[in-house]
Image: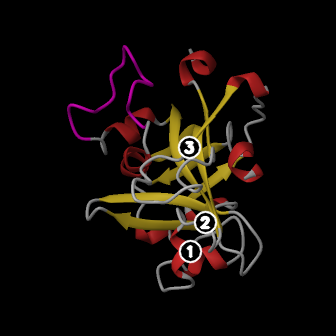
Amino acid sequence: MHTARNMLGKVLLRQFSQGIAAGIIYETEAYQGEDDLGCHAKAGRTPRTSVMYGPPGHAYVYFTYGMHWMMNVVADHVDTPAAVLIRAVHPIIGLDLLDVHRPRPNRWNANHPSLRWTDGPAKMCQAFQIDARYNGKNICSNHTGLWIADAGLRFEEDQVMTSPRVGLFSVPEPWKSIPWRWRIDPKNIFG
């Protein structure tokens, strides 16, 4: 859980052939182990979830609803499946590179650059072109072309909101309501 909170303010970077794009992470969710009925690991180790059982700092990327990619970061010791879903980023570098990957009418609006452009995990993966190629890759290193770096941003507790995780409609309590979603309001932080 601490990893999800601590990822707020980190920078997600993506190397494209034309240059680097980056965004500040401002929303995350934690998924913790086989006992967490909201976590993919509730089914145990499978070909899909095996990355979650690996070393921390690696990407767990999966396809969902037959149309969207989602990216998590493995967040616990080997054989302890836990991951942090990156739910939203605020683009700061390479806006033109990200723009070409978001279909209209959702593409970049120069008058409102942070408004709903990468405010969801599927939108973020689409803009940054994150897909199965990155599943299992070490994202603590820039050698894969996708990595997370420390930007030196720190947020006070009164700037961080917590709430239940999103989209767990069929998950029973207490897992449905545990406040394992962390978010900062990008308008208050980034203008």
> Which quarter of the figure has residue 183?
top right
Earlier-in-chain disc, 1 versus 3? 1
* Magenta stretch: helix, strand or loop mostly: loop
Q: Nearer the viewer, residue 141 or 19?
A: 141
**Placement of 9 over or under 132, stated as above or below:** above
Q: In the rendering, which numbered label is found on residue 41?
A: 1
Q: Secondary structure at mark 3?
A: loop
What residue sits right under mark 2 in the picture?
Answer: 36
Residue 111 among those drawn in magenta: yes
**Placement of 29 over or under 79, stated as above or below:** above
Q: In the rendering, which numbered label is found on residue 164?
A: 3
Disc 1 + disc 2, Cβ < 8 Å? yes
Earlier-in-chain disc, 3 versus 2? 2
Q: Secondary structure at mark 1?
A: helix
Q: Residue at x 56, y 24 (%)?
A: 186
Write the start and end of the magenta stretch as one range: 103-118
Residue 35 visible in the snapshot:
yes
Tell me where residue 150 appears, x and y as whole percent: 74, 43
Amino acid marked by disc 1: Ala
Disc 3 + disc 2, Cβ < 8 Å? no
Q: Give the number of marks.
A: 3
Which is in the foreground here, disc 1 or disc 2? 2
Structural distance between the alpha carbons of marks 1 and 3? 18 Å
Structural distance between the alpha carbons of marks 1 and 2? 8 Å
Q: Nearer the viewer, residue 8 or 31?
A: 31
Tell me where residue 62 appears, x and y as whole percent: 43, 67
Crowding at dot 2, Cα within 10 Å, few <14 / some 14-19 / many 20+, comes out as some
Q: Secondary structure at mark 2?
A: loop
